[in-house]
Image (tube, rainbow, N blue to C red):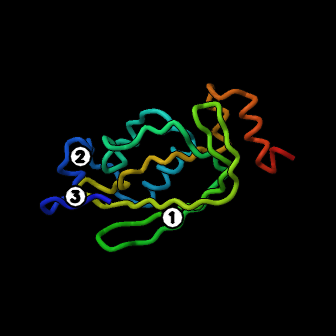
Amino acid sequence: MQVAVGGAAAYLTDSSCAFDTNGHYHDPVALVNEFLSRDEDGAFLKSDPWFDGATTCPGHEPGPDTFVIIDGRHVTFDTLPGDTVRARVTYRRLGLLGGGTHFDVDTGESVRELKVVNTPFGWRILSPALNQHVDVDALSALKWLPDSLRRRIEALVPRRGA
């Protein structure tokens, strides 16, 4: 959680956050839906200028080398005090892909919470926000992923594995 500093959120006063002061997002629900869609497509597996403008502190985001493979999600929204919207995302998890070649099967559901804050420059997702969830349907776009591993992962999905 970002701490207020002198009446302003820390991401607005800490230059190392690299907060984008361009006004981009006027609708928190649309922002979250775009964020989730891009995440599921694998856009955040590398540096992404869109991500930098959609979060409060891109300069402090981690650089993970693992991500969750999912087969869909459901999101619900609610409003919190302080001009904040919470998105609760429930994923159908297939497993964790690490180092580009190691996959651990871990099926089930997991829940992630995103908080979206209204800044003087529009809505932003509160950092840290990088917790990658790539949809199984996006695996074909990952040219570096070995075909044998892609097929192994896709076999976990009933419509593909049947």
User: CA separation, marks 3 and 2?
Assistant: 13 Å
Mark before the other along the chain sequence, 1 or 2: 2
Q: Position of residue 121 (x, y in %)?
A: 25, 53
Task: Using residue 91 as the reference point, say whether residue 86 is left or right of it.
Answer: left
**Residue at x-position 23% and y-position 46%:** 21
Q: Quadrant of residue 119?
A: bottom left
**Residue at x-position 81% and y-position 49%:** 159
**Residue at x-position 39% and y-position 66%:** 85
Q: Quadrant of residue 122?
A: bottom left
Give the secondary structure at mark 1: strand
Instruction: Find residue 88 and name its label.
Output: 1
Mark 3 Cα shell of 10 Å, populated few (<14), some (14-19), many (≥20) = some
User: CA separation, marks 1 and 2?
Assistant: 26 Å
Contact, CB < 8 Å: mark 1 with mark 2?
Answer: no
Q: Which residue is mark 2?
A: 21
Q: Position of residue 18 (x, y in %)?
A: 26, 41
Q: Quadrant of residue 31?
A: bottom left
Task: Using residue 93 as the reference point, say whether residue 33 is left or right of it.
Answer: left
Mark 1 Cα shell of 10 Å, populated few (<14), some (14-19), many (≥20) = some
User: Which is nearer the eye, 25 or 98?
Assistant: 98
- What is the three-letter code of the residue carrying label 2? Thr
User: Which is nearer the eye, 3 or 120?
Assistant: 3
Q: Position of residue 63 (x, y in %)?
A: 43, 37
Contact, CB < 8 Å: mark 3 with mark 2?
Answer: no
Q: Which residue is mark 3?
A: 9
